[in-house]
Image (tube, grey):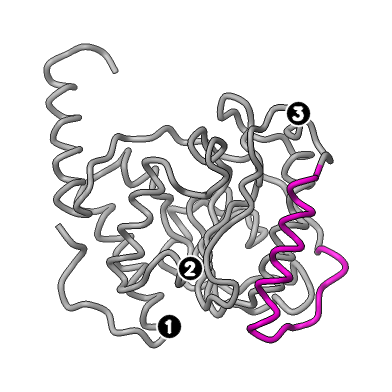
Amino acid sequence: MADLPGNLLAAARQVLETERMFAGQFIPARRNELPEMVLAPAAGAPPELAPNEKAGALGQLEQEALSCGSCMLAQTRNKVVFGEGSADAELVFVGEAPGAEEDATGRPFVGRAGELLSRMIAAMGLRRQDVYICNMLKCRPPGNRNPNPQEIECCWGFLVRQLQIIRPRVIVTLGNPATKGLLQTSEGITQMRGHWQKLPDIGEGLAGIDVMPTFHPAYVLRQYNQDTRGKVWADLRAVMEKLGLQPPDKGPPR
């Protein structure tokens, strides 16, 4: 950011507004879109599991991911960022790729955008451990560059199998890359957010799951205003209603 008083004042206002909304302090994050591509349905679907079997199945899949060397990211990653949360979650959040803090910790959404996502989940009356959070990619591209198609394809099977094990009722796609990838569409998030979609046949047992596309938390931090905040909150309220949760009468916490 240029060292100009007007810009500094705008940035300060953005941080204060974010604090009032989600009771935390955040700094805008850069957008990192994944390239568009069409991914084939994954083979080898696991059978539908009982709730007490899902955690073990996810653990076995995570061990497979930890030893994955299918693409060049295996040579540059610090840690594989597989995913975390309830193995029997009704709600799954899917983002695009890990960032620097995720790569350092091995946990998804723990950076600035992750803190905001946690506040969003809390505003829904839920906890991170009540939902499941993951990314399309399990390894961070160096320098947060855009992943190439081979890297996306190599991780695709892990994401599909995660969803096949969990079998959520609702998936929230965060931002353009996750929305375009999971829904196999070229339409952008601006057109799709707020409109219920059905998951296509990306893997056995997954077709027809309800999907709500919404803005990525990093975008909310970059474009923080009443309009963006209101749209995301409307999307989350729709998800709550779909799951039979009682939406708060008031808006997001300040």
Tell me the amino acid under the disc marked 2.
Met
The image position of residue 209, as x and y in percent, is 61, 77
Inter-mark Cα distance, 2 to 3: 34 Å
Q: Which numbered mark, 3 or 1, is in the foreground of this view?
A: 3
Which residue shows up at 53% across the image and 41% down it?
105
Residue occupied by mark 1: 242
N-term-proximal mark, 1 vs 2: 2
Residue 31 placed where, x, y %?
46, 36
- Judge whether residue 56 is colored magenta: yes
Residue drawn at point x = 47 percent, y = 48 percent: 109
Q: Is 54 located above or below residue 217 in the figure?
A: below
Tell me whether the residue at label 1 lies in contact with that at label 2, contact meaning CB atoms closer than 8 angstroms.
yes
- The disc placed on residue 112 is none
How many residues crowd mark 1 within 10 Å: few (<14), some (14–19), many (20+)?
A: few
Establish if 45 lies above or below 20. Answer: below
Q: Name the secondary structure under disc 3.
A: helix
Using the numbered discs, state the Cα–Cα distance from disc 3 to disc 1 in whole angstroms: 42 Å
Q: Which residue: 33% across, 47% down?
A: 220
Disc nearer the start of the sequence (2/3) = 3
What residue range appears in magenta? 42-68
- State which quarter of the image contains the N terminus: top left
Tag 3 residue: 75
The residue under the point 66% across, 35% down is 147
Tell me: residue 18, above or below residue 56. above
Q: What amino acid type is highlighted by mark number 1?
A: Lys
Q: Is residue 35 visible?
A: no
Q: Nearer the viewer, residue 115 or 13?
A: 115
Please state the horizontal and vertical placement of residue 75, each as a whole percent of the image. 76, 28
Q: Nearer the viewer, mark 2 or mark 3?
A: 3
Q: Which residue is mark 2?
A: 212
